[in-house]
Amino acid sequence: MSMPDSVPDLNTEAQSLSRTYTSDVAQLLEEFLAAKSVEVGQITSSAVEIVNAITSLTRGGKRLRALFAFWGYLGAGGRPDERDIVQLGVALELFQGAALIHDDIIDNSDTRRGQPSVHKRFEAQHRELGLAGSAASYGMASAILTGDLCLSLSEEVFSGIASLNARARTIFNQMRTQVMAGQYLDVLEESAGPAYDPKEAVKRARTIVRFKSAKYSTENPFLLGGALADASEALMERYSAFALPLGEAFQLRDDVLGVFGDPAVTGKPTGGDLQEGKRTELIAHALLLSTSEEQDFIQSRLGAVDLSEEEVLRLSGILRDSGALAATEQSISELTTQSDLALNALHVTPLALAGMQQLSDAVTKRSK
């Protein structure tokens, strides 16, 4: 179903609904975490900092996962003012928060959303308080516990949804398993990648993209919203056809920005994925398209502890000049087209279609 050009007010109405919804999610999230801060403070005031770290982290971001759930809910006939869909948005924001905290630990990332990552936040606390032992070890241990708490809180919020049904519960459980498995595959690829057949690198990279990111970023939130509104199986299948390729395009764009993005916009350092040794689809294409000498350089220096700025520039130059960047952009274009075709085949209201189109644009046409 194509969105009529004659009703531009649909875009305005969809934007208004999205803003109201994200504001409601932010408010409920703040209220929930404030209550948790009191609860933890009754144990000991010293531990309140772990809740503070979650609160600070979850105040940022674009709320895209929550919005996917919202428009999946409305597309299946749900009402925009229902508390349950707001609660689902909060659960998804906390789930993403946990994933980001643990991801930054695994990648040893110093920043997230333009501020210190959670383990770096606790490192700084260690130094400020003059604590004994290693600040880095303290930071890592504290962040792991903070991420675990964040994941636990996500489940607490989700399980409290009044209209929760078996289908939504199954999707949520599968989402958690998929992310953990995908994250492990990412860790395994970084360690074992040089020994694997480069001809299979693109396939392996896409599998990681799908299960570590795409399913939990777009498809599963969309399906969760649909499930809460009792969407038909046919509609749920169409939701997947739209949301999964969109999620893969979203992550591939993130991979491009991880190398070529503007740090002032992305909040992460230039070439951060190269320093972290990420074996993304960009790298997979480069291993197929570059010269033997360049391939050896990639395999030996990607993610090296002592990787210099000059080597980061050389790696990014190989990705661009070999055609790896162009190949990745082509993949993004193909996935976006696939998603657009599925979106146009959705039988939902024009308003829901407008909201979904805006989400699609936000995911694929971004610089951060």
Image (cartoon, rainbow, N blue to C red):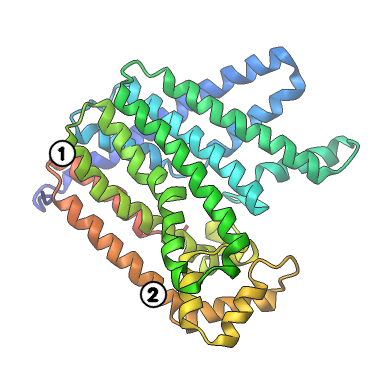
Towards the viewer: 153 or 187:
187
Position in image of residue 339 (x %, y %): 25, 55
Task: Identify the mark at residue 127; answer none if there is no mark.
Answer: none
- Compared with residue 218, is residue 304 higher up or lower down, i.e. above or below? below
Residue 58: quarter of image: top right
Q: Earlier in the sequence, mark 1 or mark 2?
A: 1
Which residue type does callout 2 highlight? Ala
Q: Residue at x 10, y 50 (%)?
A: 4
Task: Identify the mark at residue 327; answer none if there is no mark.
Answer: 2
Q: Residues within 10 Å of mark 1 (few under 14, many from 20)?
A: few
Badge 1 element? helix
Specify whether 251 is left or right of 116: left
Per the model, the C-alpha gap separating discs 1 and 2 is: 33 Å
Question: What is the tally of numbered marks visible in this picture?
Answer: 2
Q: Residue at x 15, y 45 (%)?
A: 346
Residue projecting furthest to the top: 42
- Compared with residue 290, is residue 235 higher up or lower down, i.e. above or below? above
Position in image of residue 217 (x %, y %): 40, 45
Badge 2 element? helix
Q: Residue at x 50, y 39 (%)?
A: 96
Task: Identify the mark at residue 234; answer none if there is no mark.
Answer: 1
Towards the viewer: 238 or 118:
238
- Compared with residue 42, is residue 182 higher up or lower down, i.e. above or below? below
Task: Residue 23: tell me if it is visible.
Answer: no
Towards the viewer: 257 or 156:
156
Task: Residue 5: tell me if it is visible.
Answer: yes
Q: Residues within 10 Å of mark 2 (few under 14, many from 20)?
A: some
- Compared with residue 242, is residue 279 higher up or lower down, i.e. above or below? below
Which residue type does callout 1 highlight? Ala
Specify whether 353 is left or right of 287: left
Q: Residue at x 51, y 77 (%)?
A: 287
Towards the viewer: 244 or 312:
244
